[in-house]
Image: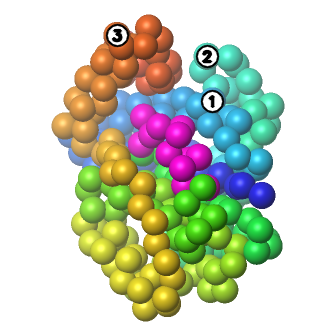
Amino acid sequence: MRTLGMFVKHPVPGRVKTRLAADWGDNRAAALYECFVRDLLGKFAEAGNRRILGFAPDNDEARHWFETTSEFSVGKSVRDQGWRLWPQPNSDLGDRMARYFETWTESPQHRTILIGSDSPTLPAEYLEQAWQLLEGNDCVLGPATDGGYYLIGLRGTVSNLAAPFHNVAWSTAGVLSQTVRQLQNHNLSLALLPPWYDVDSVDAVSTLSGHLAAFQHANGREELPATSDVLRSGLKGC
């Protein structure tokens, strides 16, 4: 069983992309993040055998938004795309990630990965590579250029699925190094994916815009239709 999980937040202004919002304002930052979510839902709609949308906060408003939102280009609902909604626990990030793996890694044959929603251009082939690497390793990490990681995966034979998430100072540049130390402390083998970038700042949005323009010119199609559209429109909303 190959399971993909993605952590997302209800795109309410003032509650998402706060780093970017400090420069752009709450509404613009939330509009961009909403498009990330819509694009990623469609992009990975057929990834793996099972797809889990870990949403936050756990309230009726957020659940309703994720139940009814549609992927931009084809108009399919979250459920139509095969995503199963799972509310993230009301705790720190490490505990939420540990609970995800403990919930969805149900047997030694399971290969379970988790991504965030801050790397909309993440190549789909990296997910396939992650699952393959888990056949011979306990853990796979996708290093992010900011010192964290954009993907983590564990195979079902790991006895302590919470091990990588203890003693980590989340939202700092030391997340990756501290996670590796935890893996070493628990004698867990590690495989690495290529580095990739999150979009959390004005400079990163400029990088994203250039990347999307280059992708369209090189391939003759848009990689992220909702995100591309909102960037062209001056971030007025998806």
Q: Residues within 10 Å of mark 3 (few under 14, many from 20)?
A: few
* Quadrant of res 105: bottom right
Nearer-N-terminus badge (3/1):
1
Q: CA distance from mark 3 to mark 1?
A: 21 Å
Residue 59 position (above or below residue 179): above
Q: Is residue 70 left or right of residue 97?
A: right
Q: Which residues are magenta?
A: 119-131
Kind of residue at disc 3 = His
Nearer-N-terminus badge (2/3):
2
Q: Residues within 10 Å of mark 2 (few under 14, many from 20)?
A: few
Q: Which mark is residue 217?
A: 3
Kind of residue at disc 1 = Gly
Q: Which residue is mark 1?
A: 42
CB under 8 Å between callouts 1 and 2? yes
Nearer-N-terminus badge (1/2):
1
Kind of residue at disc 2 = Ser
Colour mapping used in the image: rainbow
Q: CA distance from mark 1 to mark 2?
A: 8 Å
Q: Is residue 103 left or right of residue 196?
A: right
* Residue under the point 51% across and 82% down: 188
CB under 8 Å between callouts 2 and 3? no
Q: Position of residue 232 (x, y in %)?
A: 35, 13
Residue 68 position (above or below residue 188): above
Element assignment for label 2: loop
